[in-house]
Image (cartoon, helix red, strand yellow):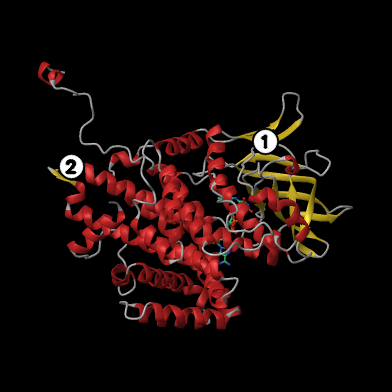
Amino acid sequence: MNADMAAQPGFDEPLNQSPPYVDVDLYGSDQPLQRAVACNGGEGDAAALSTFGKQWGSADMFELARQANENPPKLKAFDAKGFRRDVIEFHPAYHDLMAESVAAGLQASTWRDDAAPAAAPAQVTRAARFYMAAQVETGHLCPITMTRAAVAALAVEPTLVAKLMPKIVSRRYDPRFLPWFEKTGITLGMGMTEKQGGTDVRANRTRAEPDAEGYAINGDKWFMSAPMCDAFLVLAQAPGGLTCVLMPRFRADGSVNGLHFQRLKDKLGNRSNASSEVEFADAFAWRVGEEGRGVRTIINMVQLTRLDCAIASAGIMRMALAQAVHHARYRTVFQKHLADQPMMRAVLADMALDVEAATALVMRLARSFDLAADDPREAARARLLTPAVKYWVCKTAPGFIYEAMECLGGNGYVEESLLPRLYREAPVNAIWEGSGNVMCLDVIRALSREADAALTVLHELTGETLGLPGAGEAIAFIGKSFRRLDGERVARLAVEKLALLAAAAALNQVSPHHAELFAATRLATNHASMYGAVDLTNADIRGLLERALP
Ligand SMILES: Cc1cc2nc3c(=O)[nH]c(=O)nc-3n(C[C@H](O)[C@H](O)[C@H](O)COP(=O)(O)OP(=O)(O)OC[C@H]3O[C@@H](n4cnc5c(N)ncnc54)[C@H](O)[C@@H]3O)c2cc1C
């Protein structure tokens, strides 16, 4: 170092770097989210959502998320003397995140104590919170999602509901390894996937033998996440066929139930969360629904987990975009902020358009879940569009986050920035709870089995996108593709168009001008394979970036 350099004040302070993106109001700084919530009936909750957004956007919460992911859970299968323990130890930061999410009701706020759906806009306001929490830490949201979704399956068993619901809706997270009946609050997981098949659960080999109080379960599951949940919905072959059961971690007499964890998965991402391989040795379980109706029983639950996958993916896209826009506003290259370089502006604005659309789309879908109980058209919309929305949003997220990472240059590739974690996290939402092709098959199923209801949805989307560029052609294409006898072969094309159409419709409600831009660049023409390869006007680019982050 020469003497001149050393004399410069603060020479060893980094120059031309953006400050950390922390202590932000994740709600107040997100205009597209606020609009989407308001347009779907959640406006009355704005102040509370802002409080939640400030809390989750605090530096402390980002720090908890970092710690929970840098210190992944560990399986303690045995004690020092070789006795089975079958517990998983989590870092305290994971428990803190769980406590926050449970205190906010993310695991149950869409249910009443009797397992009936809570009144609207419970789904929308919870979706907004879930979207914000996902921006900070997604791993712990796995048991949160499963707990809230499992209630949809449990609802068919009034005795279980009466026993368990008070613990499920409790806002007091209780991490202790104790019988469910001794705890202040409980969480639920699910075990469906076996080695020989996750999509085709009918191939499950795990057996359920009726015994005095319920069933004795023997077999294994190849993936069972959040293994410290207090009970698990499990599919097993009973004498009457594939059946759903609820397996608690402890038996009624207070002894530990027969769940033996073999190992934890070494996963690409989702590292704060544990995903186990487990064997069941005469594990006790209660039946949920009729024997032989296992798939039917869990189907309502699956729709809710799919909705959450899409909300979480939209949330992590939002965080990646916010990080990219924030950095570009501080970073100077060739004497000009990145955020003022025409090509970078085009990239960011094009990405912002996808986030606007994804956000409007998941909030509109949450609205359908809010209204489904009393409105068959909304129930049909939720049925047809949930797999399409999961398909498009969850499969868009990984490529989107990669592009956001590149906006930060080398900093984006480095672990301390949030981007690597978001990037690793993104693919799982597309894979679990029905992978891409399976979502497309589910759309086809809805169109063939509930054709009238599905056609009503398409008709409504036609009205909601009237006049938007490319909308008419998209509808014609969707109709034609699904009528084809070889429809399965082209299903991805048609389902993507369906999701884009639904996104344009949702955005039209939130911001007609942005719906127009979205339709012009995604429906009327095929979007280029890279973000920023679009021809948006400078005024539109400015508008999108101002909306994305104040
Ligand atoms: C991190 C993580 C956590 C998980 N946690 C859980 C959990 O808690 N509980 C649980 O039960 N499961 C869990 N899973 C498992 C997950 O749900 C399954 O991996 C998923 O359902 C896919 O099943 P599979 O792995 O057996 O793949 P397969 O069913 O073998 O599918 C492989 C591929 O084939 C495609 N495919 C399937 N059928 C068709 C078809 N007819 N036509 C065309 N393509 C098709 C699928 O889309 C997929 O891309 C978890 C998975 C991960 C990665």
Q: Quadrant of ligand 1?
A: bottom right
Helix, strand or loop under label 2: strand
In this rendering, the answer to whether 191 lies above or below 437 is above
- Going 56% across and 33% down the picture, which residue do you hit? 91
Q: Amino acid at mark 2?
A: Thr
Would you say 503 lies left or right of 339 here? right
Tell me the CA gap for discs 1 and 2: 50 Å
Residue 117 placement: quadrant = bottom right
Find residue 74 and report its horizontal and vertical position in percent: 60, 34
Q: Amino acid at mark 1?
A: Arg
Q: Which residue has dot 2 on it?
A: 332
In-front residue for pair 73/160: 160
Residue 299 placement: quadrant = bottom right
In this rendering, the answer to whether 472 lies above or below 123 is below
Q: Earlier in the sequence, mark 1 or mark 2?
A: 1
- Disc number at residue 58? none
Q: Which residue has dot 1 on it?
A: 176
The number of numbered badges drawn on the structure is: 2
In-front residue for pair 48/506: 48
Would you say 189 lies left or right of 462 here? right
Find residue 345 and report its horizontal and vertical position in percent: 22, 55
Residue 178 placement: quadrant = top right
Q: Nearer the viewer, mark 1 or mark 2?
A: 1
In this rendering, the answer to whether 537 lies above or below 50 is below
In this rendering, the answer to whether 86 lies above or below 405 is above
